[in-house]
Image (tube, rainbow, N blue to C red):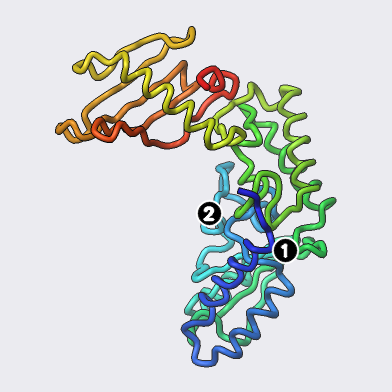
Amino acid sequence: MEFRATNVAAAQNEQARRYLTKNLTDKGAGLQAFEQLLAKMGNVVEGYPDWHPILTAPPANSAEHVYSLADVPSYRGIDHTVSFVRGFVTCPYTPVKEDKIIKAVDKIPGLSAYRLDTPLYADNAHPVVVEANTIELEADGTICSKEAITLFVEQAVKEMRTAEVAETWWNIRSLILGTPHGSRSSLFVNQYAGLHMRKILEAFNNSGVNGPIKERSLEMLSQKKRDTIRENLLQAALNEWDKSTEEFEFELRGEPCRATVRDTWDDGAELSIGVQIGKFDLYVTGFYEPKKKLFTGVDPTGKRALAEKFL
């Protein structure tokens, strides 16, 4: 489905608007404070891209990947938090936590934190706004393309030093675009920036600086094709099954396959099936209901060229 940024942003903003004001005695004041935040901080988002200063500016305790605000030591104490394109607002219940967050953030170059005079989330909460000062927004609400691409490249080069495998665009686009996102844009970056980020990533990967390319996601294929690949492999495993052996091997279209088939509930109503080629070069798993002659399951994962052999 096409990513419609305007519709997605409206839904995100409305959900956050209700979340931060529904418990307030003075909802009008809360709504006004929220609208001011929205105008200054950009649309409400779910998850930041890896290169965003909100994640990269604070000092880290280790080289581990930062997946969320809760992983950042400087933000310890955040509670009832809503994220925006330029930063976030958090609503801890005690002034001690409020002060701790502000003092920690004020030590970080490029970030600032301040108190809101108007309550949000609850009358006794102490809202704190954390903002990435260098982030500027385009007219469409996304981050300035030059800035976004520069931040992405800086982070990508930094990660090259320790990279062991090259992740494809389809594997990690949520980490590059942030969430929610479409195939090449999000509420953080427009299609121009997203397209160039993908080209840059692919150029890095093709150069070999990140190691061998690791293919996993098959989202570049249509849902119909992914379903066909899964069903063809599951059906082939079912055809080769001797009705008693749970683990066995067979060959399909020149590829050696390892399969597992078992009775899910030991009543014949459903079979659990998995097929693997290589060391997860291609992997499918799903279920078969004999009475309905119906296959179901999750999307296959692996290498595109190999997966397309089973269309």
Residue at 70% across, 80% down: 36
In the rendered image, which quarter is residue 153 located in?
Answer: top right
Q: Secondary structure at mark 2?
A: helix
What residue is shown with label 2?
71
Left or right of residue 192: residue 83: left
Left or right of residue 201: residue 90: left
Q: CA distance from mark 1 to mark 2?
A: 17 Å
Residue at 57% across, 76% down: 17
Query: Looking at the picture, how far across and down is residue 86, in whole percent?
Result: 71, 64
Q: Against 198, is 263 above or below?
A: above
What residue is shown with label 1?
132
Q: Against 309, is 210 above or below?
A: below
Q: Residue furthest front?
A: 292
Q: Against 171, is 124 above or below?
A: below
Which labelled disc corresponds to residue 143?
A: none
In the rendered image, which quarter is residue 14 located in?
Answer: bottom right
Seen from the viewer's position, the closer of residues 94 and 27 is: 27
Q: Residues within 10 Å of mark 2 (few under 14, many from 20)?
A: some
Q: Residue furthest left?
A: 267
Left or right of residue 38: residue 238: left
